[in-house]
């Protein structure tokens, strides 16, 4: 997805209360956060977004609805802004989303009928890079590099496996798994990587050729056809030699 919006359906409204939403957004996309939808008769006076990021100072941005004038805005990250003109749209936009945007975003709305609040707990997802390689003695290594959160790795078939995690300074995690296959009857293994941004798989034959499962299937069919053609060719040659011997040629 290139963008994600937290906005409620236009027919929904909230009572004066504080509500919470846990929202996961992939890095590099656009996120749009919406304030509570309140009845038009509520008498909205002031709207304030308060932003508490994990590794940065808190900041806020506000709009006085009675005067349609923007108030205090001390958010210095240019990627966090009003989605459009605040006097027309109170949505907050984050574009593009980065790991540093993980944190809490609260919309506070002061009205004559009461106060309305909604807090978003934003989690930033990073898709890992997946690699698969053959090492010595029929040992295979699969890595899910720089994912957030950490990816999980599974094997088919299962082998003698050791899996660990390496935590990076930027908040991403590399999951590394090594499997040993002493059984010579196992010719192909598949690494399955599970992650909230999507699941992926890579396969390798134990001669060191990395390919997707479909390519392995086609390779096996091709080898079977070549084997059949080779058998037929040998049969024809042998038959021709036998006929020559019978005819005394």
Image (cartoon, helix red, strand yellow):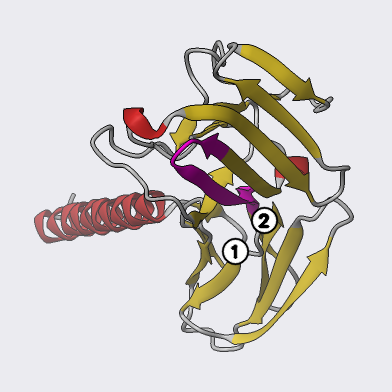
The residue lying at 75 percent from left, 77 percent from top is 164
SS class of the residue under badge 1? loop
- In this view of the protein, which residue sits in the foreground, 232 or 35? 35
Q: Which residue lies furthest to the front in this view?
A: 112
Rendered position, 80 above or below 126: above
For the residues labelled 2 and 1, the Cα–Cα distance comes to 32 Å
Question: In the picture shown, does residue 235 fall above or below 87?
Answer: below
Circle 1: is it few (<14), some (14-19), or many (20+) Cα within 10 Å?
Answer: few
Between residue 224 and residue 217, name the one nearer to us. Answer: 217
User: Which secondary structure type mostly characterizes the magenta part of the structure?
Assistant: strand
Q: In this view, does 76 lie to the left or right of 11?
A: right
- x and y, in percent, of residue 159 in the image: 56, 85
Residue 125 in magenta? yes
Magenta residue span = 109-130
The residue under label 2 is 148
Residue at the spot of label 1? 207
Assess whether residue 191 is covered by the magenta stretch. no
Locate residue 124 relative to residue 39 in the image: left or right: right
């Amino acid at each position: 997805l290139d963008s994600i919006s937290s906005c409620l359906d236009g027919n929904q409204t909230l009572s004066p209360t504080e509500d919470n939403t846990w929202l996961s957004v992939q890095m590099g996309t656009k996120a749009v956060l919406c304030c509570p939808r309140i009845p038009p008769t509520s008498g909205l006076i002031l709207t304030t977004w308060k932003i508490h990021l994990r590794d940065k100072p808190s900041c806020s941005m506000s709009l006085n609805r009675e005067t349609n004038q923007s108030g205090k805005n001390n958010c210095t990250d240019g990627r966090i802004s009003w989605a459009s003109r605040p006097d027309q749209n109170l949505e907050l936009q984050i574009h593009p989303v980065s790991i540093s945007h993980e944190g809490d975003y609260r919309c506070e709305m002061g009205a004559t009928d009461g106060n309305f609040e909604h807090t978003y707990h934003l989690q930033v997802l990073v898709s890992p890079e997946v690699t698969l390689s053959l090492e010595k003695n029929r040992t295979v290594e699969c890595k899910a590099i720089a994912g957030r959160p950490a990816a999980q790795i599974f094997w088919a078939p299962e082998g003698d496996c050791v899996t660990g995690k390496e935590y990076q300074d930027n908040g991403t995690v590399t999951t590394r798994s090594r499997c040993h296959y002493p059984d010579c009857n196992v010719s192909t293994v598949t690494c399955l990587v599970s992650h909230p941004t999507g699941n992926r798989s890579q396969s390798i034959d134990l001669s060191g050729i990395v390919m997707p499962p479909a390519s392995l299937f086609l390779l096996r069919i091709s080898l079977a056809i070549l084997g059949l053609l080779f058998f037929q060719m040998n049969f024809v040659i042998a038959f021709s030699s036998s006929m020559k011997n019978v005819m005394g040629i």
